[in-house]
Image: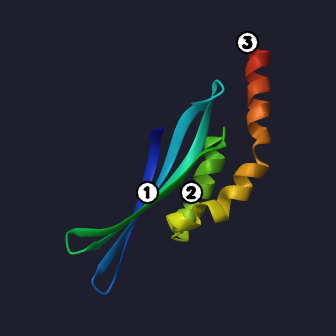
Amino acid sequence: MNLVEEYTSINRDDDVEFRYVYRLIKKEYRGIMAYGIEIERKDYVGLKNINLERRSIDIISPHRYKVKQLIMNLYNNQVSPIHLIDIIGSYADEHAYEFDMAIKQEQAIN
C-alpha cells in the first residue's frame, strides 16, 4: 500500500478529541494501478490515545478520480472507519468490472 493523498479532520466533544484521517491509497493489482481508501480514527483525552479504529478497502477502482470523489464524500460527511464497508462496499463490488476493462486495454496496447 502506498499513500497518495491524506485528509485530516479534528473534532472535539467535551474532553475528548476525535482525529479522523482519510487516505487515498494505491497498489498494483494484476499489472495495473488500483486505488483504495483507508480511514483511521484516533480518540484522545489530553495527550493520551484512548481509542484507535482503522478500516480500508485496498482495491476500489483503477480510476484515481473516482476514488478521490468517494473519499471527499466520506471526509465531508465525517464517516467513521466502522461504517466504511457498509457505505462503499457495494460501490466497490459494482465497479469491479473496471479492472477487467483496464486489463484488456493494457493487453491491447502491449
- Quadrant hosting residue 100: top right
Q: Residue at x 48, y 38 (%)?
A: 1
For marks 2 and 1, the one nearer the N-term is: 1
Task: Out of 88 and 53, give the one closest to the viewer.
Answer: 53
Task: Out of 86 and 37, give the one closest to the viewer.
Answer: 86
Q: Residue at x 20, y 75 (%)?
A: 46
Q: Is residue 109 above or below residue 102?
A: above
Describe the element under mark 1 as helix, strand or loop: strand
Q: Residues within 10 Å of mark 2 (few under 14, many from 20)?
A: many
Q: Which residue bears the numbered disc 1?
A: 7
The x and y percentages for residue 62 are 66, 38
The x and y percentages for residue 23 are 47, 51
Going by the numbered disc 2, the residue's amino acid type is: Ile
The x and y percentages for residue 52 are 38, 63
Q: Which corner quadrant holds the C terminus? A: top right
Describe the element under mark 3 as helix, strand or loop: loop
Given contact means CB atoms under 8 Å apart, are the residues at marks 2 and 1 in contact?
A: yes
Describe the element under mark 2 as helix, strand or loop: helix
* C-alpha distance separating marks 3 and 2: 32 Å
* C-alpha distance separating marks 2 and 1: 9 Å
Left or right of 47? Residue 81 is right
Question: Residue 110, which numbered label?
Answer: 3
